[in-house]
Image (tube, rainbow, N blue to C red):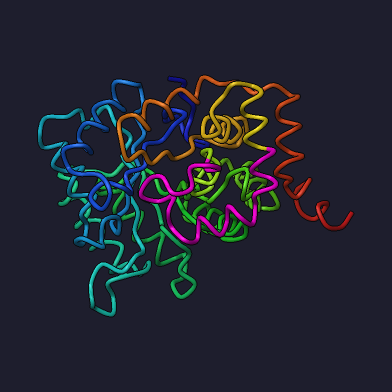
Amino acid sequence: MEYTFLGRTGLRVSRLCLGTMNFGPYTSETDSFKIMDNALDLGINFFDTANVYGAEIGVGTTESIIGKWFENGKKRNSIVLATKVYGKMGDGVNDSKLSAYHIRKACEDSLRRLKTDHIDLYQMHHIDRSTPWEEIWQAMEQLANEGKIIYAGSSNFAAWNIVEANYTARQRNFMGLVSEQSIYSLRNRHIELEVLPACKAMGVGMIPWSPMGGGILCGVLGNIKDGQRRSREPLQKSVEKLRPQLERYENLCNEISIKPADVALAWVLNNPVVTAPIIGPRTLEQLEQNAKASEIKLTEEVLKKLDEIWPGPGNQAPEAYAW
């Protein structure tokens, strides 16, 4: 497994990040433990979760599964642990978003569920337009001073949110955001316009989620009815809408003898701003297959063909649409 720095920090993380969103709703506790065991064995030291994951079967379910795994003697200090705050965690008027009140309570609750004394990367799951940055950073600074978090990150932020957040943090002599989680794949390249350039300029590491396009880049043609998620109606509609591109894509993958899911991950990893795409395996087999993608280097010819099949904006803003 290759390792890289998380944004402008001195922290080294694996080039793949283990996403845990399936733990609980789709993957049993026992199988989740096996996946985390194998991820460590494969050299993946970067684990990502969120306090809202698994809420459909119980508040904080996924974090609790990870906490039980730690409690069973697993190597907490060998893992860079990331979780998130923002989502609705109760029925109270202050049980969501990014007030200092909620950030502190949510962090304490996550620590309790995760059975750890600190969170390595505490990420804001979405932008909160109603809370000023002075309040947000005050809360994060307090948690950092208490040793409960080490780094702060964001998720689903616009480029100007990232810049505003970090300039405000700089005024307070606080490190600010070191990473951003955004949706990014061959199928969805919107962040190439502004978010990726902002991250590059600010030293913010990119952690793409859904790097395989919600499963559509995993070789779905002919297998649309297979698996728990491939039979979902929205995915079926997307396949029909994108069928010409998918046919060209899967034919190219066959020509170079690399599985479509591996090509999708390798393409995301090829971007120098990307720290680690998030993989969310439901099974050990999926984990082992995903791990191989970190070793794949796509040729310039293949990258050019992928750009033709899945074109991006062509340049960053404003050149992408002006001069």
Does residue 216 appear in this view? yes
Residue for point 76% across, 31% down: 304
102, 287: nearer the viewer: 287
The quadrant of the image that shows the N terminus is top left
Question: Could you say where residue 256 lies in the image, as x and y percent from the top left?
Answer: 64, 22
In the figure, 239 relative to 139: above or below? above
Question: Could you say where residue 142 lies in the image, as x and y percent from the top left?
Answer: 30, 55
Taking the view exactly as shown, the residue that stands out farthest to the bottom is: 93
Q: Quadrant of residue 135?
A: bottom left
Residue for point 57% across, 35% down: 264
Position of 109 with respect to 46 (left or right) is left
94, 187: nearer the viewer: 187
Q: Is residue 230 magenta?
A: yes
Question: Could you say where residue 234 lies in the image, as x and y percent from the top left?
Answer: 50, 61
Question: Could you say where residue 195 lies in the image, as x and y percent from the top left?
Answer: 62, 51
Q: Tell me how many marks there are.
A: 0
Residue for point 34% across, 21% down: 42
The quadrant of the image that shows the C terminus is bottom right
Taking the view exactly as shown, the residue that stands out farthest to the right is: 323
Residue for point 56% across, 31% down: 269
Does residue 12 appear in this view? no
Span colored in magenta: 220-248
